[in-house]
Image: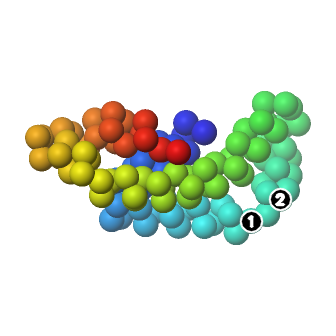
Amino acid sequence: MAVGITLALAAGYIGGLVDILISRLIEIIIAVPSILWLLMFTTAIDRSVQTLIFAVAFTFTPITIRFFRGNVLQERSIAYVEAARVIGASGPRIMFRHIMPNLA
């Protein structure tokens, strides 16, 4: 979930090419059924609990990214984010200090 939220913050706040690349990667992952990802990971790596946990996390991370990206797009247009940008706060500070705590 931490990876999903971080990628959603980057895609939603930075936008542009970063947003396009992350969105296309998510679409590719979602296009393949989850059970197929699970089978590919377990046959390619090994049949262990850690591999299964990684595969399940890999298949559910795009859903998390899509959900939080939409919230980031809404939050970045609110006045306190604009105020933080005006006073000279860096992009990572705005993302992690102002936007992330307000994601629902």
Mark 2 is surrounded, within 10 Å at the Cα level, by few (under 14), some (14 to 19) or many (20 or more) other residues, namely few
Q: Of the residues shown, which amino acid type is indicated by label 2? A: Leu
For this orientation, the residue located farthest to the front is 79
Q: Residue at position x 56%, y 58% from top?
A: 66
Q: Which mark is residue 36?
A: 2
Q: CA distance from mark 2 to mark 1?
A: 7 Å
Q: Residue at position x 75%, y 44% from top?
A: 55
Q: Of the residues shown, which amino acid type is indicated by label 1? A: Val
Q: Residue at position x 62%, y 55% from top?
A: 62
Q: Position of residue 7 (x, y in %)?
A: 48, 48
Contact (Cβ within 8 Å) of mark 2 with mark 1? yes
Q: Secondary structure at mark 1?
A: loop
Mark 1 is surrounded, within 10 Å at the Cα level, by few (under 14), some (14 to 19) or many (20 or more) other residues, namely few
Q: Indicate how the structure is coloured in the image.
A: rainbow
Q: Is residue 4 visible?
A: yes
Q: Position of residue 89 (x, y in %)?
A: 18, 38
